[in-house]
Image: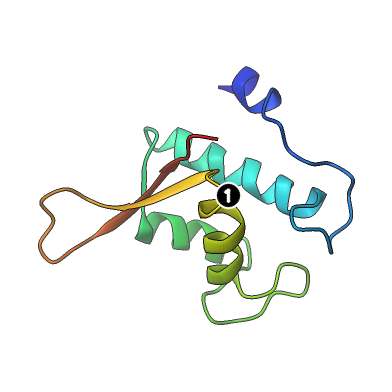
Amino acid sequence: SYALISKMALPSDGSPSDEFGLPKSGLLMVLLGMIFTKGNRATEEEFWEFLNALGFYAGRRHLIFGEPTRFISKDFVMQKYLTYCQVPNSNPPRYEFLWGPR
């Protein structure tokens, strides 16, 4: 919920060159909101469809964020803001994004 998001401990010094500055924090909030509206889980397809609508494309470098797959896995998943996991019993394997423990 909004109250939970507003209480998250995110760095906010605003420098885009930091490990996790204001621009990435803003994008993270938008992505967490999208996951929330999808029932607290978003398929990989839904996630990328949403990112594409925002102008982020896998394999295409973004001016501020760099390559989206890299910053999502490095900044958001590895730092536990997002969880990326296989959908149970999916064959062929499908993946989804959920809120991370952080």
Instruction: Give the left or right position of residue 92, taking residue 84 as reference.
Output: left
Q: Which of 73 and 68 is in front in this view?
A: 73
Q: Is mark 1 on a helix, strand or loop?
A: loop
> Quadrant of the rendered structure where residue 72 is?
bottom right
Residue 50's x, y, as percent? 50, 56
Q: Position of residue 11 (x, y in %)?
A: 79, 41
The answer to whether residue 2 is above or below residue 33 is above
Q: How crowded is mark 1: few (under 14 residues within 10 Å), some or many (20 or more)?
A: some
Q: Residue at x 49, y 46 (%)?
A: 82
Picture quadrant where residue 90 is located: bottom left
Q: Where is residue 37 in the image (x, y as percent from the top left)?
A: 46, 34
Q: Where 17 sits versus 13, above or below? A: below
- Residue drawn 84% across and 60% down? 16
Residue ranking furthest to the top: 3
Total numbered badges shown on the rendered structure: 1
Vertical order, 47 against 35 (above or below): below
Considering the image in quadrants, where does the N terminus appear? top right
Q: In this view, does 40 lie above or below 92?
A: above
Give the side of residue 26 with respect to residue 74, left or right. Answer: right
* Residue indicated by mark 1: 79
Residue found 40% across the figure and 38% down from its top: 38
Q: Which amino acid does label 1 sit on?
A: Gln
* Viewer-side residue, 92 vs 84: 84
Q: Is residue 78 left or right of residue 14?
A: left
Q: Residue 87: where, in percent of width, then height?
A: 22, 50
